[in-house]
Image (spheres, rainbow, N blue to C red):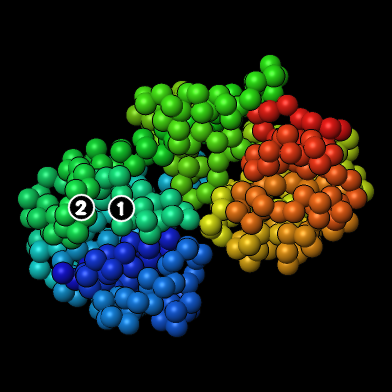
Amino acid sequence: MRIAMIGTGYVGLVSGACFSEFGTDVICVDKDEAKIARLEDGIMPIYEPGLDVLVENNVKAGRLTFTTDLKEGVKGAEAIFIAVGTPTRRGDGHADLSYVYAAAEEIADAMEGFTVIVTKSTVPVGTGREVERIIRERRPDAEFAVVSNPEFLREGSAIGDFMRPDRVVIGTTDERARDVMRDLYRPLYLIETPIVFTSRETSEMIKYAANTFLAAKITFINEIADLCEKVGADVHDVARGIGLDGRIGKKFLHPGPGYGGSCFPKDTLALVRTAQEHNSPLRIIETVVDVNAQRKKAMADRIISACGGSVSGKTIGILGLAFKPNTDDMRDAPSLDIVPALIAAGATVKAYDPEAMTEAKKLLEDIIYCDTAFDTLEGADAMVVLTEWNEFRGMDLDRIKSALKHPIVVDLRNVYDPGEMAEQGFSYSCIGRASIGG
């Protein structure tokens, strides 16, 4: 089978590489000539563990190629995936679908014979219907089917998520399209992955419902963490105690400074706007969006409080800038709220992230970027953990103490043990547990 992937962003590149690993001939199309040139040279535009090797192997095998020519790219393709960006639209919070619709127009002009057009991008309910209308209007004689096939990839573990998914959701009622999609996902069917066929609208809703539910779960445990601090409870024990309930589950019950990234912020907001348009408001999700936004802003106050109520003239060492570990993604990262607030309060900020420094420099100015974690801490008045990279978990505590002017640690990801920090003499503040020292 031959497929085309329109867009070489996170979803398009990972999906294209993984499909090629299954033995499918994949051509990835992108208008960005510089990006395509780098991909042909084996240079990845994003950081995702294992992606560079996966791309290299499949390019060598001849199953994965790249082009800027959409017409040439879709020639002979049985399925064409739309995997372009759908960022939040300025002004109203809706998903910006202009890239999706532009891709649909170009596909309509270029496709040959019966073609399955698949929306892989995260799109609101009804987008598939509009894509079909655009193509039908442009090519009334064409044979095609528009299918929804949402992605459920977690940044940092996307390849494993694609190769061994919890489920595959395919939204179509067209039998020919079902046959093409079954054939494409046959390697997963053979390992008994649940393949869920639904209507197109249902498939589109599944994606948004899944992401907003997870965002709500994160926000729930964050608010429980705040209450734990007030009443003297331990949020980790609470999370463990409720997570063992099979109806709840243990995943996404890790307290922190608020969710960020490419999915949860824009998807929760987009679903809220869709619900409001249809006069069926989602009050829970509206609250989740508001609570999360306020939480990220409040984290700077938590750091300032741990530093004695003021950071004016003080140096703060920040470990981690990406919204989560194993990615260089800075989209809606808590650091984008926290760091500017500290600077506005008079602090000098030093920072280090294993992978996100290049992206961070585009978004965060007036901070000192360091080459290592300990360079960041040298001479700082306090250490703040913003992203739970593994290399921060096992840092030598004696060395941390000797690097800092004062033994102040603000752990917004709870990577350290409070008891051990107390024994080492740190003034230690974390999420959902009582602070120690001071």
- Is residue 136 shown left or right of residue 294? left
- Is residue 90 shown left or right of residue 142? right
In this view, the residue in front, 117 or 182, is 182
Q: Which residue in the protein does label 2 denote?
A: 191
Q: Indicate whether 389 appears above or below 421.
A: below
- Image quadrant in which you'd find residue 342: top right
Residue type of the residue flagged with mark 1: Arg
Residue type of the residue flagged with mark 2: Ile
Quadrant of the snapshot with the N terminus: bottom left
Sequence-earlier tag: 2 or 1? 1
Whole-percent x and y of residue 116?
17, 59
For mark 1, give the secondary structure: loop
In this view, the residue in front, 379 or 12, is 379
Whole-percent x and y of residue 380?
86, 53
Q: Which residue is painted at 30% across and 45% down in the image?
A: 166
The crowding category of the residue bearing disc 2, from other C-alpha atoms within 10 Å (few below 14, some 14 to 19, many at least 20), is: few
Q: Residue furthest top?
A: 231
Q: Which residue is painted at 65% across and 50% down in the image?
A: 393
What is the distance, in whole Å, between disc 2 and disc 1 at their CAs?
A: 9 Å
Q: Are discs 2 and 1 less than 8 Å apart at CB?
A: yes
Quadrant of the snapshot with the C terminus: top right
Q: Which residue in the protein does label 1 denote?
A: 164
Whole-percent x and y of residue 351?
74, 57
